Image (spheres, rainbow, N blue to C red):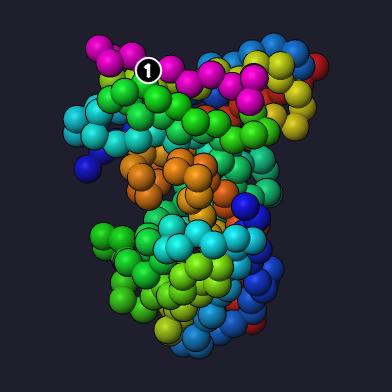
Amino acid sequence: QVQLAQSGAEVRKPGASVKVSCKVSGNSFTSYEINWVRQATGQGLEWMAWMNPKTGNTGFAQAFLGRLTVTRNISTTTVSMELSGLKSDDTAVYYCVGGADLNYWGQGTVVTVSS
Amino acid sequence: IVLTQSPATLSLSPGERATLSCRASQNIRNYLAWYQQKSGQAPRLLIFDASNRAIGIPARFSGSGSGTDFTLTISTLEPDDFAVYYCLGRHNGHQITFGPGTKVGLK
């Protein structure tokens, strides 16, 4: 079993960047791929990216190419995602999710983009 | 790929059977999962690889299908089952798409 603990809520202005971290514990850090999924209020789920923490390989949804970065820190067993060029419609809850079947969900991080 | 879920809303009573559909725009073999989400909570994995129940999921939840057409069935609705259900398809290796969701509400 794996536990995912995310960083706290963030508020940013349009055009800025935001970094959300996801601390992985409870099992080997390299055992589970990590995905990032977001959900705007009252809307559905949107997949953003994945990372293999063992190899560092990543993949991104077309909608985020060029403005989303996913990194890992093996020593702190943390995966982070950084979204740049923020717009108001990036306001959402951002989840890190572990496992190839997206079995294990973090608690979510609220990101608000507002001028 | 595009995943289409139907119906968008399902109004049922406890004890009834719920049948939810997810259709993929192209063949995704059995790379289909189902999630349940309640208000204010993160989604919960119910079914993976089209028909396998996740750990701890009651037997009243079952999944079927392959290729482009998939079904989630809740055999006898419990009060705790009223929620939004999403399908997820995996394609091109690690690319993932979610369906728009089906809300199962109380009649």
Whether B51 is drawn above or below B42: the answer is below
**Which stretch appears magenta?**
A65-76
Amino acid type of the residue that numbered disc 1 sits on in the rendered structure: Arg
- Left/right placement of residue B91 relative to residue A2 reads right
Q: Looking at the picture, how far across and down is residue B82, in whole percent?
A: 53, 69
Tell which residue pokes out farthest to the right in this image: A115
| Residue at the image position 42 percent from the left and 54 percent from the top | B44
Q: Answer yes or no: is residue B82 visible.
A: no
Q: Looking at the picture, how far across and down is residue A70, in whole percent?
A: 48, 21
Looking at the rendered structure, the secondary structure element under dot 1 is strand
User: Which of the image's four quarters has the C terminus of chain B?
Assistant: bottom right
- Left/right placement of residue B60 relative to residue B28 reads left
Whether A3 is drawn above or below B75: the answer is above
Mark 1 Cα-neighbour bin, 10 Å: few <14, some 14–19, many ≥20: some
Q: Nearer the viewer, residue B81 or A73?
A: A73
Q: Answer yes or no: is residue A88 visible.
A: yes
Q: Looking at the picture, how far across and down is residue B2, in whole percent?
A: 65, 55
Pointer 1: what residue?
A72
- Res. B27 image quadrant: bottom right
Tell which residue pokes out farthest to the bottom in this image: B16
| Residue at the image position 32 percent from the left and 66 percent from the top | B53
To which chain does the residue with label 1 belong?
A
Tell which residue pokes out farthest to the left in this image: A27
Whether A63 is drawn above or below B1: the answer is above
Please tell me whether residue A19 belongs to the stretch shown in magenta: no
Whether A80 is drawn above or below A34: the answer is above
Q: Looking at the picture, how far across and down is residue B50, in whole percent?
A: 41, 66
- Res. B8 image quadrant: bottom right
Q: Nearer the viewer, residue B52 or B13?
A: B52
| Residue at the image position 64 percent from the left and 34 percent from the top | A62
